Image (cartoon, helix red, strand yellow):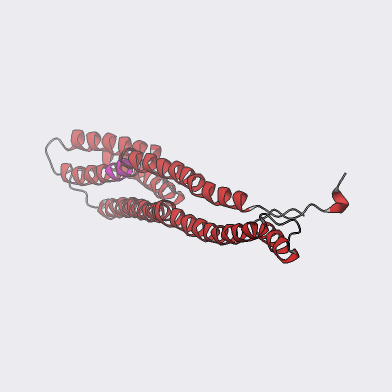
Amino acid sequence: MNNLTIVTKIRFIAAIAPAILLLAAAAIAGAFHVFGTAPREIYENEYAAARSAQGMENALYKMDWGRTQTDASQIVMDQQRGFISEIEVARQHIGSREQAERIEKIANDARPLFDALRTAPPGDDSLEPRLRDLQGAVADLMSIDDAALIALASSAESQARTMIAITIAAVAVVPWICFVVIVRLSSGLYAELKEMRRHADALAGREQPPSGDVRALDESLTNLGFAKPNPMLAE
């Protein structure tokens, strides 16, 4: 099996740094794209879901307050329409199974409650416990939405730390490691070439070269990857 020459080794080590930098550049560019689009995605998804839950909560409070007003029927109907609209918005921005289950529970609980509110007399307080339960379910949904926002922020922080580590390794650590390896290889090359020069000078002008100098030259060439051809492989 042929040994790698010193030239091949140096070229291989020299090629490692730009190759890794190229891969790191692609990863860093992708990370910049992800981080650049993250605010819009948060606004269009997690933040929209949180706003819809807040809209449900406001509608319930206004509905409860409106039942005691002179135009109670109109206020209650308006807030019911607003509540249903917020549920539809929340359904369009579901990010987890827990959110989906909570939204459907709120929708199922709200439908019979709203039917009862439309027919209940203004002073009837029998529906207050059910209204409070629905408000509690909406508050739970808001907590889930907040947790989703926090989880997304934590994920972004973790990705940022990972990209910082990749950048430091690609830009600082890897090139310096390649530099150190090349210096060590070239220092060995320098010593071998210097020894070969000394033996070449010793052989110059001699009709019968000393076997020691020839053997030393052969060993130096072998160390540099230029070994004698295998006679078994010769044509």
Q: Nearer the viewer, residue 173 or 31?
A: 173
Q: Is residue 1 left or right of residue 169?
A: right
Q: Position of residue 110 (x, y in %)?
A: 34, 44
Residue at position x 31%, y 35% in the image: 85
Residue that lies at the very extreme toward the left in this rendered image: 70
Snapshot quadrant of residue 81: top left
Residue at position x 71%, y 55% in the image: 3
Snapshot quadrant of residue 117: top left
- Residue 3 vs 28, above or below: the answer is below
Q: Position of residue 153 (x, y in %)?
A: 33, 52
Assign the N terminus to one quadrant of the image.
bottom right
Q: Nearer the viewer, residue 115 or 188?
A: 188
Q: Nearer the viewer, residue 84 or 35?
A: 35
One can see residue 168 in this view? yes
Assign the C terminus to one quadrant of the image.
top right
Q: How many marks?
A: 0
One can see residue 94 in this view? no
Q: Position of residue 214 (x, y in %)?
A: 72, 60
Q: Is residue 99 left or right of residue 23?
A: left
Q: Nearer the viewer, residue 99 or 16?
A: 16
Span highlighted in magenta in the image: 47-51
Q: Position of residue 49 (x, y in %)?
A: 33, 43
* Membership of 110 in magenta stretch: no
Residue at position x 53%, y 57% in the image: 186
Q: Main secondary structure of the magenta part?
A: helix
Q: Is residue 25 left or right of residue 215?
A: left
- Residue 234 vs 194, above or below: the answer is above
